[in-house]
Structures are given as C-alpha cells and as structure tokens.
Image (cartoon, rainbow, N blue to C red):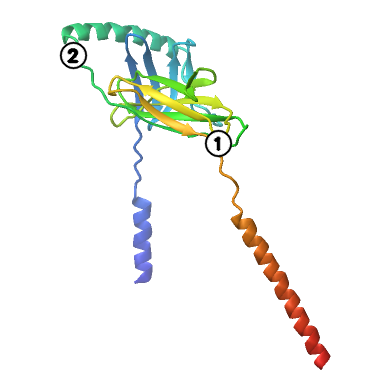
Amino acid sequence: MTLTWMLLVLTGIICTETKIVHVDINLRGCSDSDGEHMYALDGEEMGHADFTKGKFVMTMPEFADPYTYEDSVYEFAVAEQKLCKQNMQIFTEAYKSPAEAEAPPMSSIYPRHEVKVGTDNTLICLITGFYPPRLTVRWTRNNKNVTQGVSSSQLRVNVNDFSYNQFFTLKFTPQEGDIYTCTVEHQALEGPMTREFDVEVSEPSLGPSVFCGVGLTLGLLGVATGTFFLVKGNQCN
C-alpha cells in the first residue's frame, strides 16, 4: 500500500508542468518637451534611449552572458519620437485638447547609509505613483536652495497602472542640526509637497557599559567569596 502511494506521488511530480509567465514591456511616449523609449521585463528596466547623450543605455547588471540590443535601436527610438509627436498633434486637434489624466505623487526621504557627522552620504527622495511624468524637485539645506551634488534617475513605469516612479538624490556631508528638504511640484498636487530630513546623531547609551561593569564586579566578588570559604574549609579539616 505504501509503495503504491509513493509511486503515484512520484508520477504526479514527473507529469506536473510548471508554467512561468513573464511580462515584456516596450514603453514609448512623448510630450512637448521630452520623450521616453524603454524596454523592461517583469517591471525591471533593461535599457532606455538617452536622448540627451544620444545613445541607448543598458541598465541591467552585467552577467556572464549579458543581453544587449542592436546598435540601430537608438535610431529606431529617435524615429519613433518623431512619429509620436506627429500623432500627438493630430490626436490633440481631433479630440479638441482632451483633459489629461492625473495622479498625484507620493514621496519619502531617507539616507543611503547610516548617518555619521562629517562622513559623506547621499539623501534619496523617492517619488512614486505620479502621472503625467512631469514634475519639479527642489532641495534645500537649512532653508537655502541646493543645486550641487543633485541627480535624478530615469523614469520608471508601473506596469499595473502606468504611473511613474523616480529617484532624486543629493550628495551631502551631514552636520549636527542640519535640516534638508525635498520639495515636489506636480500638476496633480494642490500645492508643493515637502519632505524633511533632520540630521540627528544619538549619544551612545551608558546603560550597556554600566550593566557590564556591575556584572563584572559582582562576578569577581562572587569568585573572591567562594575562594575565601574554600580556604577556611580546608583549614578546618
């Protein structure tokens, strides 16, 4: 009976077919001022056309057998941008400038590494879930605008709703009491959205040191007491 059950289980495993579903994305978009041409797999970007640098940029980590696109993919992206802007003008006129869909962004601010006074670090302002993909981000330090050491990532699309995410970073050297802010402006917001980061360095706690000292002292007293009674006991014998 047991042997028969084991054979049935093994047969079921051998006959089971696992199906893996992947989502391949080719995103092409344009606006009056910029454009997007990106390839992704399962929500992770593989590469995009950088229209500022004039080339196609692979963003996947290097593997033993890396995947690459043909050299002509950038030229194709440029041609697609021209077609996109032509179509956008035609559709805008045909539909009499329809209202644009909007989704307000959410943001958060945090350091890349543990904050240590005087040690170089990076502040990250993560902005998610916004549409259309146009926004403005400003950094301040102690209420003064900061433009040095600022950078931003490529737009990242959410395949579920086609909203966008983007990272903005600021290289900084934290000093005690500094206050940094990341302010986001987007057409779906009623007003600027600001996130604040305060440089606070906690003082080392004396608790563990005190407990260790007390414990060590009591331990030594216990050893001394035990040795005293052991010597006395030997003398009595």
Is 131 or 160 nearer to us in this picture? 131
The reply to whether residue 63 is visible in this rendering is yes
- Residue furthest toward the right? 235
Residue 133's x, y, as percent?
34, 20
Q: Amino acid at mark 1?
A: His
Is 13 or 173 nearer to us in this picture? 173
Q: Amino acid at mark 2?
A: Pro
Residue 209's x, y, as percent?
64, 56
* Cα–Cα gap, marks 2 and 1: 45 Å
Quadrant position of residue 10: bottom left
Q: Which quadrant does the C terminus fall into?
A: bottom right
Residue 1's x, y, as percent?
34, 72
Height in image: 79 above or below 156? above
Q: Is residue 39 left or right of residue 177?
A: left
Height in image: 94 above or below 37? above
Q: Which mark is residue 113?
A: 1
Count of numbered circles on the image? 2
- Residue furthest toward the bottom? 237
Residue 201's x, y, as percent?
56, 40
Provide the secondary structure element on which disc 1 rests.
Answer: loop
Provide the secondary structure element on which disc 2 rests.
Answer: loop
Alpha-carbon neighbours of circle 1 within 10 Å: few (<14), some, or many (≥20)? few
The reply to whether residue 61 is visible in this rendering is no
Alpha-carbon neighbours of circle 2 within 10 Å: few (<14), some, or many (≥20)? few
Quadrant position of residue 213: bottom right
Quadrant position of residue 90: top left
User: What residue is rendered at 18% in x and 14% in y?
Assistant: 98
Residue designated by label 2: 98
User: What residue is rendered at 49% in x and 30% in y?
Assistant: 179
